[in-house]
Amino acid sequence: MFSYFLSRRRLSRSFEPCDGGFLYRRRPTAQAVPVTAEEREQILRTFKSTYWKYHAILWVLFFILIFAAAGLAVISSVPDEAGTFIGYLCAVILFAGIIFVDRRILSIATASISARPPVQPRRNWLQLIDARLATVPWWRLAAGGAFLVLLAWVTRSIATASLWGSIGWVCYFAFCFGMWIRNVWRKWQLAARV
């Protein structure tokens, strides 16, 4: 149930309002395709029905796989280590199945608009971040910096636990603070243009 709401939210966020209609991007960096409000509602309805159908099939197949693997393990009297391996293998298969099914559901739901010519070109991640920064208020950037400082202070024991822990801690927070400084700098540049 939780994954349904996450998937539906991700799909609904793929539609950007534009001139009384919407622009649909399969990924945030993909080309934008024009969609009317009625088409958007139809895509969301198709997504809902297709999601439950395909996930029901996936879970039935997964439980059949689990029972078959458990039955074979009991009949063959495999050691405990093999049972653990089978359990991890089933989890990997389920994870791969969920990814495959979610992509298939998205393709089915958006099949009616997939052949349309795009009206906006692709964009890279930095352009996407800049577009989001243009609408983010300054207080959220300040709160993000304060949160990073608090997180670094709370997890500082990792830096003293071992050599690899300290290397990982320094690299992680160097990246996070670097991105935060870049976002503040770009927000200042974008605000200066207006």
Image (spheres, helix red, strand yellow):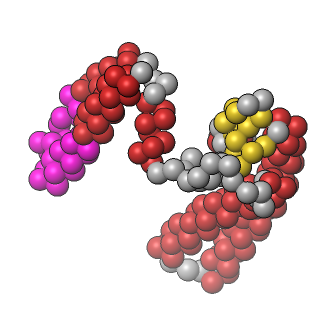
Q: Main secondary structure of the magenta part?
A: helix
Q: Quadrant of the N terminus?
A: top right
Q: Is residue 71 magenta?
A: no
Q: Residue at x 43, y 36 (%)?
A: 130
Q: Residue at x 45, y 43 (%)?
A: 127
Q: Is residue 154 visible?
A: no
In the displayed structure image, the side of residue 53 where residue 22 appears, left or right: left
Q: Residue at x 47, y 51 (%)?
A: 124
Residue 12, located in which quarter of the rendered image?
A: top right
Q: Is residue 172 visible?
A: yes
In the displayed structure image, the side of residue 116 where residue 191 appears, left or right: left
Q: Quadrant of the C terminus?
A: top left
In the displayed structure image, the side of residue 18 where residue 122 appears, left or right: left
Residue 156, located in which quarter of the rendered image?
A: top left
Residue furthest to the front: 193
Q: Nearer the viewer, residue 59 or 79?
A: 59
Q: Residue at x 60, y 61 (%)?
A: 95
53 above or below 8? below
**Image location of residue 21, percent across then percent down:** 77, 34
Residue range corresponding to the magenta coloring: 152-175
Q: Is residue 156 magenta?
A: yes
